[in-house]
Amino acid sequence: MPTRGAWLGQGRVSRGSASRRRGWKATCALTALLGGIAPALAQPAAGTRRSGEQDGPAGAVTPRAAVGVDATLTFGPADPAFFNYTDYDENALRLALVSLGASYRLTHWLEAVAELQTANTSRARVSALFVRVTPWRRHPVHLAAGRIPPVFGAFARSRYASDNPLISAPLAYQYLSTLTPHAVPSSADALLAVRGRGWYVTYPGDTTPPVDDPSEYDPDSGAAPPTAGHRGVALVTSSRWDTGIVARVEGAALTVTGGVTLGSLSDPRVDENNAGKQIVGRLTWRPHPALAVGVSAARGAFTSRAARGTPGPGTGGSPQQAAGVDVDFSRGHVRVRGEVIRSSWRIRTPLPPRLDDPLAAIAATLEARLRVSPRIDLAARGDWIGFSKIAGTLYGGRPTPWDADVARAEAGVSYRLSRHSRVKVAYQHNWRFAATRRTEGFPAVQLAIRF
């Protein structure tokens, strides 16, 4: 089964309440079916071995092919404030996600990896498709090309629910800001006018064609469907993988990874949309088995050609650049993880008041997990995103964060039902610091099955 940590993206499906309920029933049935057949699928074919490798001392062989299934059912209430909205128009607390992954080793140095994924019974999409090359047996150098696992950050490389001690993702990897690669705000005022509305961005005066179909706007939100708009982006998108090539070199305590991709951290791409490329790298230092420290950096083109075509001067290329530091420490039954990410976008507005400085955002996450028994884990996480200030004519001309600051606290318990399944119960509380402060709390239950 291809996993992000082992190194080896959901389509738009907001179709209304009735179809969503039908999708839930179908996905639950599909999950039950996969749970029954996955153990058989996961078994290697008899007598297969990796090319060029010998049998083990007991005659064991390593399979050429491997198949894995990952299914997650998350049950929670509606989110009228869109704190848990994802970049595929889904409430992450009402999500049924099924992934089918496979890998095939062609030779001792070449392996092909693919994964199909469906969310709430939407049309299956290819979420991963790449080849992995290990040129030298005696040297820990690995190459991957295609739709590849992410390089930046810590959480994005721990993709599956079984790797997450809680139900939600950290805000930096999920919460939608009011920037979009498909449109450029005409001025600082146009950006300030949509603060705290990243789930559906409609800049005043924007004439670029909407990417989303307003008829598919989620009716559970309680809001009237807009006439046009775009989806905002997270600081780092974890639900989609980028396309490119990446290399990794491993040492005794130091691992260096670097690559070139078509998209950016906020907008991973399968196709090229702006003639730009992203350079991304990561360094991981493990001075002790219980401690890992990571440093990541990336810079890539963000806005699309359509957005750059906005009339007016100064709407040229708008890069996104980011840097992050993460720490992972474990001792006994306790594990603590923390991460800080700073991302900035250079947006050139065609009209005054202009954006003279890059738009910046800083996200911080702190997470702790306690294993109280072989089957039971307790976990808690705190998240915060703060946005840099800009000045226009709105808000009395005072410097104001270009998007509303947001915070989240989440705590939960998970219980391991079997070697392949786990159930989680969690509660999260969210704060959005806009013109009027708004808070929302949500309980949720999740069943995670993985073979």
Image (spheres, rainbow, N blue to C red):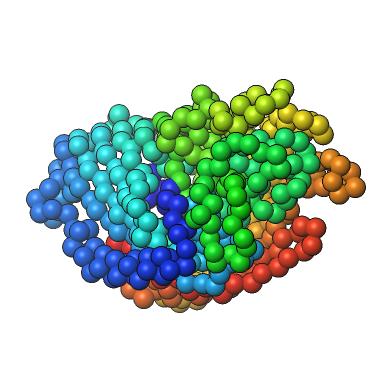
For this rendering, which residue is in front, 352 or 234? Answer: 352
Residue in view at x 47 percent, y 72 percent:
75
Image quarter of the C terminus: bottom left
Residue in view at x 64 percent, y 43 percent:
179
For this rendering, which residue is in front, 349 or 59? Answer: 349
Q: Is residue 240 left or right of residue 138?
A: right
State whether residue 40 is above or below residue 342: below
Q: Is residue 294 visible?
A: no
Identify the image quadrant of residue 325.
Answer: top right
State whether residue 84 is above or below residue 146: below
For this rendering, which residue is in front, 350 or 209? Answer: 209
Q: Is residue 408 left or right of residue 161?
A: right
Q: Is residue 127 visible?
A: yes
Total marks shown come to 0
Residue in view at x 33 percent, y 38 percent:
130
For this rendering, which residue is in front, 95 or 245? Answer: 95
**Residue 309, x across and y down, in percent:** 61, 26
**Residue 285, x across and y down, in percent:** 53, 42
Q: Is residue 353 left or right of residue 386?
A: right
Identify the image quadrant of residue 203.
Answer: top right
**Residue 146, x across and y down, in percent:** 36, 34
Identify the image quadrant of residue 300.
Answer: top right
Residue in view at x 9 percent, y 50 percent:
47
**Residue 344, x across and y down, in percent:** 67, 38
State whether residue 8 is above or below residue 446: above
